[in-house]
Image (cartoon, rainbow, N blue to C red):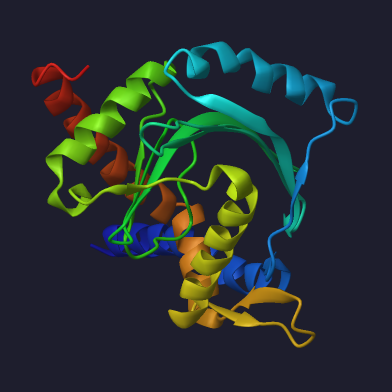
Amino acid sequence: MALIETLGGMLAVYLLAPLVVGIPIVKAQHWVTRRVQITPLLEQESPEIQEWLDSRREAIEAEGFEVQGAYRIENFTANVTTYFQLYLHSETGLAAMSVWVQSLAISARYEEISQVFVNGRTLNVNNSRFASSWRVPLREVRRFPWLAAFSDLLKLHRWLVAQNRDYASEGRPFPKDDAIGYLSEHMNHELVVQAQNGLYQASQDGRNWILTWPGAVHMVFVNAFPGKQLLSFKELGQNRDLEKKARKAGAL
């Protein structure tokens, strides 16, 4: 019994250490800007990234999307730059992106399809390997990192819309003449929602959002062992079940 108790105590320390050690560090260092700045990506700045973004263009345009341009989001949060190519579908109001996220620790590339509905709900389908740290009310995000084909993501998006009454209302198209402004405001609004939920607060100089203690606990739990693995296992399991249902229905 003593051995079991000892091993149990050691396991508890192992599991809780990232939370105990990480929370103060993350609270002190993590921030996001209060105003998202999206600027055009110049080809000579990042030719490798631009080349990859362009390599995804044919598959996306084959589905009726029109490219709007390549952009970057820099200094949204510390040491992370996001590059993306934006596409719009004039008939359905869908927006699609090929995305390259670059940080000191990781480099992630994925594609996503998003739609905002007139009832305020949003559906995002993507093949990113990384889950979002935050859950936003009225926004559903479905990840399928094992699907490489953009056409499969689009078929799943359509099937999910057809299955959910919450998406029965008409889609609200991205305004083609100000798609980037619309996207910026949408991102800013989601940060305000997190502040209203008590996870962020304004910094003293008012320039950034910084984590509250509950926000730091949440951030570490969803990004560190074992919380990250548990949440990912549950999320991806649910998404695999959805994919199986879509295939059984002939949607894929």
**Residue 106 image offset from top left, x and y in percent:** 67, 37
Q: Can you say which quadrant of the picture contains the C terminus?
A: top left
**Residue 153 image offset from top left, x and y in percent:** 36, 26
| Quarter location, residue 181 | bottom right
Q: Residue at x 57, y 52 (%)?
A: 183
The answer to whether residue 84 is above or below residue 75 is: above
Visible residue check, residue 135: yes
Q: Can you say which quadrant of the picture contains the N terminus?
A: bottom left
132 with respect to 140 (left or right): right
Q: Residue at x 38, y 17 (%)?
A: 151
The residue at the far left in this view is: 249
**Residue 207 image offset from top left, x and y in percent:** 76, 76
Q: Residue at x 33, y 61 (%)?
A: 120
The residue at the far bottom in this view is: 204
The answer to whether residue 82 is above or below residue 200 is: above
Q: Residue at x 9, y 19 (%)?
A: 248
**Residue 243 image offset from top left, x and y in percent:** 22, 27
